[in-house]
Image: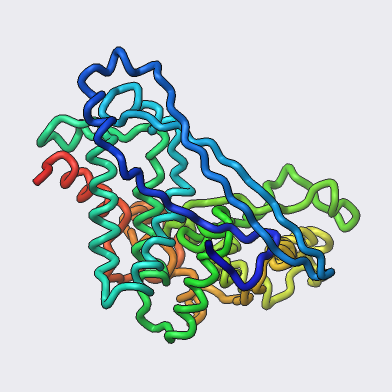
Amino acid sequence: KWSIGGLFSNTTLCFLFDVANTDNASASGNDGAQNNNNEEFGYIQFITSYTTSYNTAITRVTTIGIEFVNPLTKVGTDKIIGGFDQEAAAVILARLATFKADSEFEPDLLRWADNSLIKLVQKFSSFTKGDIHSFKLPREFLLFPQFIYYLRRSQFIQVFNYSPDETAFFRATLLRENVTNGLTMVQPLLHAFDIPPPEVEIDDEDDEQNPIVGEEVLLELSSRHPERILLLDTFFHLVIWYGRKIAKWREDKIWLNEEYGHEYVWFKKLLLAPKQECINRMSTKFPCPNLIECDEDSGQERFLVAKLNPDNSKTVGNAPDDLATGDVWSDDVSLKVFMDHLKKLAVNPQ
């Protein structure tokens, strides 16, 4: 029996159960063809009792059926792969890391997360021993290593520069939010607002017909552009970043310049689009995230750059006018180096 102080409409709790009796599965692994069609289910029932704000006592019963399969057979492994939810698994691993941090003395969370990922890919990937180019993950697992990469860099594991109160707040919020919000905390969302193409005409009266909407882009340094506005959503912060050309046009208020007439009316709507998106996101989140606005090369830009993949190689070869100024130097390895090292460890098991 467990108890919790309060429940919100989006409260999501995680229960993990260990399968204690694995002897039968091991014994039946030899006669797989005979037992492949035998479907066994386990049932878990939750009885939740709570009192509403109107002082009404409610009891809700939820029954969940789970199919047990033999992981030693190909059919069982295929069913496990087909039912794998990589987004939920990443959030569960983050919650487990939070639990270990609160219940163990100085746990090495980085090593634990790395070992968990290595064991997973060795179990479900296909490869030729010693050949890194033969490494291949099932489609259901493709994004999971990327999620763990950003989990290693998140505030749940890297607590440097955060007070104990902030760390406790971050972890407590992770433990109660749903998968979508939890994944946003682990791997933030980045949206880009670009200048509308010339063939799209935007007037003062067609806000609803032709709204300027953001496009989701990769968490890469190359996503920065002088003529672009970026919106970063980390759940706890909303960061609006303006490229240097956008910032200059904003300071000059070019949409008010009579020399251009109505040629730059769209620019005012471009500036308002990320702010309206922030308002929409703030209305659905509790606690309300902090809003940070910054320009390229400003001090507040660190809130954006700290969440991006520190890979400067993807910006090589582009024209200087298409690049955001300043390289990013970081002790963290890039996502590409992380994936290459993961493949090397997977195909060379020790």
Q: Residue furthest front?
A: 1
- Asked if 31 appears above or below 239 in the picture, the reply is above
What's the residue at 68%, 47% (across, down)? 197
> Residue at left 22%, top 40%?
122
Q: Position of residue 6 (x, y in %)?
A: 65, 70
Closer to the camera in the image, 72 or 169 = 72
- Residue 131, horizontal then vertical, whole percent: 13, 34
Q: Let me know if residue 7 appears in the view.
A: yes
Q: Nearer the viewer, residue 121 or 20?
A: 20
Towards the viewer: 325 or 230: 230
Q: Position of residue 225 (x, y in %)?
A: 51, 60
Q: Residue at x 26, y 60 (%)?
A: 112
View extreme (right): residue:
205
The residue at the far top in this view is 34
Above or below 26: residue 242: below
Picture quarter containing residue 157? Answer: bottom left
